[in-house]
């Protein structure tokens, strides 16, 4: 199976968990429930992991950020986050530009 941009984008949509910014530790942390963060992580920073890795740009275009995926890889909980090989390849392939895409909700909303 070849790894295409579409496969990488689909893999990013399957990421599990939540990311929040922990102000006292001055870093992002990962949890698997929105309720598991505690008081040092403001609610407005808590984001589903599959949305955290996409950065908004101009005209509804978003960029799949390698540095944010790398941050998730550093957690060493790939199975729980559902980080698959297409995402690992994408992070390693710094010789190619980051993927940009117009993202839409699946399922007709």
Image (cartoon, grey):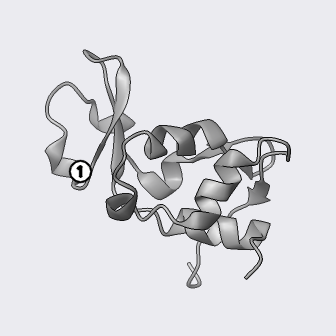
Q: Residue at x 65, y 43 (%)?
A: 65
Q: Residue at x 77, y 77 (%)?
A: 2
Residue 104 in sight in this render = no
25 or 3: which is nearer to us? 3
| Quarter location, residue 46 | top left
The residue shown at (30%, 18%) is 23
Rendering coords of residue 11 (x, y %): 58, 68
* Residue named by callout 1: 34
Work out whether residue 37 or residue 92 is closer to the camera in this orientation and state it: 92
Is 57 situated left or right of 108 in this image?
A: right
- The quarter in which the N terminus is drawn is bottom right
- In the image, is 96 to the left or to the right of 11? right
Single out the residue that lies furthest toward the right: 96
Label 1 sits on a secondary structure element that is helix
- Compared to residue 103, the image places residue 45 above or below, namely above
Rendered position, 69 above or below 86:
above
Residue 109: x %, y % from top left: 56, 78
Relative height, residue 16 to residue 73 (above, below): below
* Residue 91 visible: yes
Packing grade of label 1 (10 A; few <14, some 14-19, many >=20) is some
Number of marks: 1
Task: Work out whether 40 lies above or below 90.
Answer: above
The residue at 76%/60% (across/down) is: 102
Residue 55 locus on image (x, y percent): 64, 42
């Amino acid at each position: 199976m070849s790894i295409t941009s579409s496969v990488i984008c689909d893999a990013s949509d399957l990421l599990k968990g939540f990311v929040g910014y922990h102000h006292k530790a001055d870093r992002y942390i990962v949890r698997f429930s929105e309720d598991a963060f505690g008081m040092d992580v403001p609610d407005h920073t808590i984001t589903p992991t599959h949305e955290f890795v996409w950065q908004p740009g101009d005209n509804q275009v978003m960029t799949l950020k390698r540095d944010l995926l790398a941050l998730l890889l550093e957690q060493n909980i790939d199975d729980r986050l559902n980080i698959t090989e297409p995402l690992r390849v994408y992070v390693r392939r710094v010789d190619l530009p980051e993927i940009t895409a117009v993202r839409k909700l699946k399922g007709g909303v």
